[in-house]
Amino acid sequence: MLKLIKDDIFIWKGLNKNQIEKTLFLINKSKHHSFDNISFTDWDLEFSKEYWNFLWNECLLDFKKSFCKNFNCDDLIVRNYWFQKYEKGDFHQKHVHEGCHFTNVLFLENSKTNPTNIINYNIPKKYIVDGTILSFPSYRVHESKKHNFKKNKTIVSFNTDLYKICNSSPREIKYKT
Ligand SMILES: [Fe+2]
């Protein structure tokens, strides 16, 4: 289920325990390197990503459908995807995502300890739950603060575009203020 929580920020709930565990299993045997200040990520690595095939084809059908329904569009195009596993001391500096409408963060493991931080918006803690996706416009500046915990934090990030918004009967999009 997709839920608008603030302005143009959404939460989708969510993966079940088995889906989370299988995704983590596939990520843990996936190719990776360290990038910037993140110990394990497949950012910028080109290969067939089994964890993503599993997620998109078997777990995120409702996410895609809900997004299309909310924005009255024909399709939701995924531009790219990658995982990030934060070890103690890792962080991701403030940034935006270029060339896409939405940035999505799937919380997978220990996300509550050090959640994604969207600048100028405190995400209510009740929404930071493993298996949940946080979606926000890609121009919103965000970061992952220094991870000060022994247990790793793992997320999958992916960028999406809305495709063919139907203009014959546009749906009014209401924003919370
Ligand atoms: Fe990001």
Image (cartoon, rainbow, N blue to C red):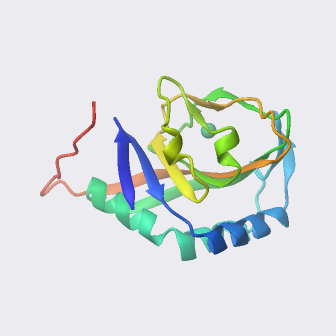
Image quarter where the N terminus lies is bottom left
- Furthest residue to the left? 169
Q: Which picture quadrant has residue 28?
A: bottom right
- 106 versus 103 height, above or below: below
Q: Is residue 100 visible?
A: no
- Give the image location of residue 87, x and y in percent: 84, 42
Residue 30 or residue 101, whichever sits in front: 30
- Furthest residue to the top? 120
Q: Is residue 175 visible?
A: yes
- Give the image location of residue 170, x and y in percent: 16, 52
Residue 135 or residue 75, whichever sits in front: 135
Residue 32 or residue 44, whichever sits in front: 32
Image quarter where the C terminus lies is top left
Quadrant containing ligand 1: top right
Q: Is residue 151 left or right of residue 16?
A: right
Residue at the location (26% across, 38% down)? 175
- Give the image location of residue 45, x and y in percent: 78, 54
- 48 versus 97 height, above or below: below
Residue at the location (49% across, 36% down)? 123
- Give the image location of residue 39, x and y in percent: 86, 43
- 120 versus 11 height, above or below: above
Q: Is residue 71 left or right of residue 171?
A: right
- 142 versus 153 height, above or below: above
